[in-house]
Image: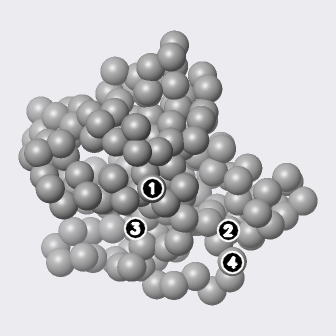
């Protein structure tokens, strides 16, 4: 697996990753996280991924030369409380379902942890969907994150998690 910087040329691949995740969730009746509409047909989603691709925090994991996952890091999302100390925030993480179970998400989160340490920040934060069976929250806990604050955006239940970073780990 190789992790490389992402950019505007990756927008269609990333939208495809989201589309595969939305289809997988929808097949299981789990539309609370991202709905049932493919990202590639939603103008606001296309704009969001395109903006993220321009901002410099996008990384693409490739497996066998194919884009398999994407992480975007940067500033905290506007709907969460601001940081109380310097941090790196995981704005999005998505894995193409064709590559599920191959450690793509763990590798991208490992990259983010190393990036945070290299920047000398003490915390890596992420938020995620906390509805249904809570499996997404549990996934982040298995990756080393700890729950900090539950929140809602409208009726969408979310959970903020954080990972403490050793500043000498870089």
Crowd rating for badge 3 (residues with CA inside 10 Å; few <14, some 14–19, many 20+) = many
158 or 2, nearer to the observer: 2
Number of numbered tags placed on the structure image: 4
In this picture, is 51 found above or below 58?
below
| Residue indicated by mark 4 | 86
Q: Position of residue 14 (x, y in %)?
A: 35, 39
In this picture, is 132 found above or below 62?
below
Location of residue 154 by image quarter? bottom left
Q: Is residue 147 visible?
A: no
SS type, badge 2: strand
| Residue indicated by mark 1 | 54
Crowd rating for badge 4 (residues with CA inside 10 Å; few <14, some 14–19, many 20+) = some
What quarter of the picture does the N terminus occupy? top right
Q: Is residue 8 visible?
A: yes
| Residue indicated by mark 3 | 159
Mark 3 vs mark 1: give the one in front.
1
| Residue indicated by mark 2 | 123
């Amino acid at each position: 697996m190789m992790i490389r910087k992402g950019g505007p040329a990756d927008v269609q691949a990333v939208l495809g990753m989201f589309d595969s995740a939305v289809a997988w969730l929808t097949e299981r009746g789990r539309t609370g996280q991202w709905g049932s509409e493919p990202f590639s047909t939603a103008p606001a989603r296309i704009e969001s991924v395109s903006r993220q691709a321009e901002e410099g925090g996008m990384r693409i994991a490739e497996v066998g030369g194919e884009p398999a996952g994407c992480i975007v890091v940067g500033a905290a999302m506007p709907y969460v409380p601001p940081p109380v100390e310097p941090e790196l925030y995981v704005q999005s993480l998505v894995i193409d379902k064709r590559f599920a179970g191959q450690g793509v998400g763990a590798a991208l989160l490992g990259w983010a942890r190393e990036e945070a340490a290299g920047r000398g920040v003490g915390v890596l934060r992420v938020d995620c969907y906390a509805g249904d069976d809570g499996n997404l929250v549990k996934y982040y806990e298995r990756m080393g994150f700890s729950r900090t604050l539950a929140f809602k955006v409208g009726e969408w239940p979310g959970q903020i998690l954080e990972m403490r970073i050793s500043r000498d780990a870089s």
